Image (cartoon, coloured by chain):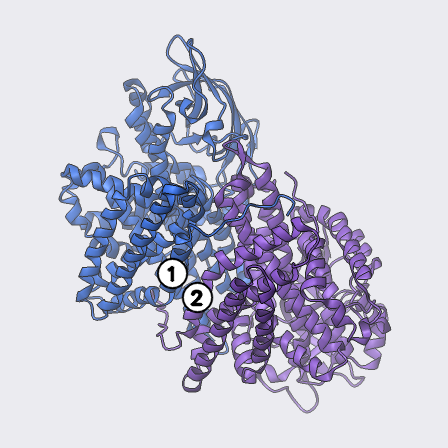
Chain colours: A purple, B blue
């Protein structure tokens, strides 16, 4: 059976039109006032054709061939250069960039759906284009007029893709320990020296230029930068300098990785490379965080893409594979396993797209108060989406492999590559453990619970709307129970944190799992409400069965997470190094 | 940081001596009457030296080099032939085989500990030796005098390793669909014809002969065998025939797999190969099941071995990796993650070793009633061990990878190989979904709950003993609560099954998870009791902290599984093939 991708366009349209009612939002955003569902649908259809027609055929071959480093240059797998040219020519990278810089000015909501499809079809390939939207936002916000005119349109279009150079061998999640130096020159440029690791796409042969965004410590005549993360600056360092010469950096090696073989993960050193400051000196981390929030949503969407392609291939296999004279899809064990995957994938799509719509409104809504509120909402949802969608992405790949049985363990079927590729999403752009701390410490406790209170109020509104359903009480009661858990648990942690600063850190993971179930319950309830009146009765029946499966069979697992999250005074032992 | 293995000999001795009080059991088994703890300890120490000294150094190189098929012959990675020779010369395969056939007659309990260590150090290598104990048991029980005298001692010693040829392309878990034919010859031998897939170690260059056990359909003058699984026979088919000629089979290909690259997974066809019947015609499945039960325990022990090596390397890395000026091992997130892994690994070791001891007593105890009872116990625990230890093995590898961060995703550290290798254990020897059905349908409902009642009575005895602990009430209450859940849930499923034959199948997975938590709670309570009076106070303090962590932080997750297992009247939808 071939690994295949049927883009879930019907599902995507359902979420965009019916669950989120995006057109009502677009009408309040001047930037999207001319957009209608027909145009949006056409964009998604075209994106689906590109993903399954151009990217999917290069997925397995790219994994097997991998990238090679020779004489300092990285060569990508066969077919990748043409596909990248097609990506840029199709205008896909610039979809959500402003028209001023050559973009199409479409909502991030549509960009999210496209990223989901493209990651599903070829996660490795899409790594090359992944950073550029974040780089575009960063250069647009922090670049000088000269830097913008020289780089912004080319980065937006993907003609010059970007790479983020953050990590150094001695500093993983601890950015304060970075050492790469930038010496300010009389002409205002920087000379960058230092070693970086884990840079996706630092070099390749897909494009004529590559733009690095490098975290470094600025040194001028007045002396060194402050120690720690408050002394970090962000520099733009291109592969090819404006005079056509090659910049002074050397790629030392490529990592041999579990997956993503088609994405070169580079270790390199800058040997007095030329760059320019992006934003204020010593404010590099703030500029970087702008990139990281959108990057974290993108990582969540990669997890979602893997969920979708793993689930749909497992379902197809379960209907094709006959044992004891019936397709295994009819057995209760396979129904349990696969309905779980469907309920999770579809629920998490609603959450991710809701966050994308919040980001669109935060930037473009006519009401400033709404912009502020949606900015808080997106910040609150980002760590949940990054952690939940990637963890479920990996679990889904493993569950789907189980459906394939022994065949799933072989390379003949695409699922083992899916399992290997998706695993990195739980690690990069901040490990999921860091997301949990970010959620609880910064996004909930950090603003006194404001963003969470706003969210819970909206979710109560959805619970009230569930009354119109035939089985609405089940959804309303489930959602209200999760809201109550979120409220009481948050209050308990706030109270505990007042006396014990470590308390939130002990329960942060459990708290993220609890809020994830809260959001899933909302997504299932909202989907159940939105399917009312659907004329495609077969689609409606399936949708109802799957969201009901979420409430009936998955939701019981939430209670343990809430209990663990409330256990702020349960001792947590120290580790014994002698084990 | 190097991937390392410190054999958990202190833990193993604690379980064998203190938790299970194995010497008291050996005293009641004539076969082990001469065995003492000093001898047992020496065997384990020697085994640990072999595993970490001989097998571990070949683990990464074996993975990278893999096996090759050329001109019909399989070549193993460099160093494997010498290591296999050392394995056989050391007497390791025959450790638990009877002295009559050249074995050492030691308990399976010690064999279990050795298998755990050897799988941890080199799962791929050990695949070649994995089947032979099951093959030894099968030939001993079902072989003719002639077959035994020709093959048994050589299989027991590992000089001629064995392979199991079950699966065919059209029949995965459905053995009734097998087609390989065996034609009875006038001289009593068989001519075997047919195709088999997924045969681990069907060919290699480790030994001069390889003995296949082949499931096939016997055809004699009276016509064909019955259809389905009742028409299956078991044949012994050696690579080299007694006259020194090569048997008529051809290895067609090796699978390219996610992991276990050092174990050749062969597709082959028998072209009128010569073999001999093992046991009665058409009773092949019964003969096979004898192999499968011990094989399933072994697979669980592979999962346990991966848990141990992943956990201890992650702990070491967490103490070596400094971020924000402290080892990450001191952060609450890492303590949560790693204490969980330690509590699981150590608890599951107790469960697995208890099952091995039950098998020893089932074969050797002086009291026939005890033998019967322990035979039921082993049968009941086998599917739990196979599913729980392998699922946790995979989850542990992934959690440990998370501790290594981006480094864990690269080949430099051993954890990505561990993740790839351990994944197959959830699939082979019966998928974990099949284990869940075996547990509930055959092992619990099938005998009217007898084996489970006996188990629960023993567990109540442990709950009563917990009273002697300082915090004994916590363990006693937790264990009694789990026993009550098991009792009420089993009764509810029994009642539901009377009216709805599909009901147990809908909740079998959740039921296995529930019983897994029951057994873990017992293991933690028994460990807490057994550590009383331990003179190594540092070991005792760490042990107490870890078992307490299990009760406090992991056990809350049990309730959801019990609730799902009791949900026999919650509808489970059909899958929609159109998605």
Task: Find residue A559 and name its label.
Answer: 2
B233 left or right, relative to A473: left
In this view of the protein, which residue sits in the foreground, A265 or A513?
A: A513
Give the residue drawn at x 50%, y 36%.
B264
Label 1 CA crowd tier, 10 Å (few <14, some 14–19, many 20+): some
Q: CA distance from mark 2 to mark 1?
A: 9 Å
Asked if residue A203 shows in the view, the reply is no
Which numbered tag is attached to residue B352? none
**Relative height, residue A29 to residue B21 (above, below):** below
- Residue in view at x 28 percent, y 41 percent: B448
Label 1 is found on which chain of the structure?
A: B
Res. A7 in view: yes
What crowding class fits label 2: few (fewer than 14 Cα within 10 Å), some (14-19), or many (20 or more)?
Answer: some
**Residue A434, x across and y down, in percent:** 53, 71
Q: Quadrant of residue B521?
A: bottom left
Instruction: Indicate left or right for A543 with B554 as reference.
Output: right
């Amino acid at each position: 059976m071939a690994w295949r991708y049927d883009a879930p366009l019907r599902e995507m349209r359902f979420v965009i039109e019916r669950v989120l009612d995006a057109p009502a939002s677009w009408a309040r955003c001047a930037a999207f006032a001319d957009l209608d569902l027909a145009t949006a649908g056409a964009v998604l259809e075209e994106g689906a054709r590109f993903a399954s027609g151009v990217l999917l055929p290069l997925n397995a071959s790219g994994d097997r061939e991998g990238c090679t480093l020779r004489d300092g240059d990285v060569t990508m797998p066969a077919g990748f250069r043409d596909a990248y040219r097609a990506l840029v020519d199709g205008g896909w990278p610039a979809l959500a960039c402003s028209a001023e810089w050559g973009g199409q000015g479409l909502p991030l909501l549509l960009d999210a759906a496209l990223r989901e499809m493209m990651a599903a079809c070829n996660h490795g390939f899409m790594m090359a284009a992944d950073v550029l939207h974040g780089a575009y936002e960063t250069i647009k916000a922090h670049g000088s007029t000269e830097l913008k005119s020289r780089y912004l349109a080319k980065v937006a279009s993907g003609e010059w893709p970007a790479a983020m150079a953050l990590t150094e061998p001695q500093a993983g999640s601890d950015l304060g320990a970075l050492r790469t130096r930038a010496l300010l020159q009389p002409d205002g440029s920087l000379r960058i020296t230092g070693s970086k690791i884990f840079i996706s796409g630092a070099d390749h042969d897909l494009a004529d230029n590559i733009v690095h965004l490098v975290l470094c410590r600025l040194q001028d005549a007045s002396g060194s930068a402050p120690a720690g993360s408050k002394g970090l600056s962000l520099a733009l360092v291109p592969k090819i300098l404006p005079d056509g010469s090659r910049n002074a950096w050397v790629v030392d090696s490529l990592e041999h990785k579990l997956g993503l073989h088609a994405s070169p993960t580079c270790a390199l050193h800058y040997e007095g490379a030329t760059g320019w400051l992006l934003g204020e000196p010593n404010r590099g981390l703030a500029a970087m965080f702008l990139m990281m929030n959108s990057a974290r949503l993108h990582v969540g969407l990669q997890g979602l893409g893997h969920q979708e392609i793993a689930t749909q291939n497992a379902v197809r296999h379960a209907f094709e594979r006959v044992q004891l004279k019936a397709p295994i899809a009819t057995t209760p064990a396979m129904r349990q396993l696969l309905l779980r995957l469907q309920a999770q994938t579809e629920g998490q799509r609603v959450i991710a797209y809701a966050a994308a719509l919040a980001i669109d409104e935060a930037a473009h809504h006519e009401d400033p108060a709404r912009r502020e509120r949606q900015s808080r909402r997106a910040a609150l949802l980002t760590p949940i989406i990054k952690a939940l969608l990637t963890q479920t992405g990996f679990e889904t790949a493993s569950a789907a492999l189980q459906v394939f049985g022994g065949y799933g363990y072989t390379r003949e079927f695409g699922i083992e590559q899916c399992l290997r590729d998706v695993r990195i999403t739980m690690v990069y752009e901040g490990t999921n453990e860091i997301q949990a701390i970010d959620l609880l410490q910064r996004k909930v406790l950090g603003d006194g619970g404001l963003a969470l209170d706003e969210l819970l109020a909206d979710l109560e509104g959805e619970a009230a709307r569930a009354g119109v359903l035939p089985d609405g009480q089940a959804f309303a009661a489930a959602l209200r129970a999760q809201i109550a858990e979120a409220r009481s648990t948050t209050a308990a942690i706030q109270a505990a944190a007042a006396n014990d600063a470590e308390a939130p850190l002990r329960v942060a993971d459990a708290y993220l799992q609890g809020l994830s179930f809260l959001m899933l319950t909302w997504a299932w309830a909202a989907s159940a409400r939105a399917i009312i009146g659907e004329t495609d009765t077969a689609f409606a029946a399936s949708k109802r069965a799957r969201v009901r499966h979420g409430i009936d069979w998955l939701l019981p697992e939430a209670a343990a997470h809430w209990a663990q999250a409330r256990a702020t005074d349960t001792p947590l032992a120290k580790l014994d190094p002698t084990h």
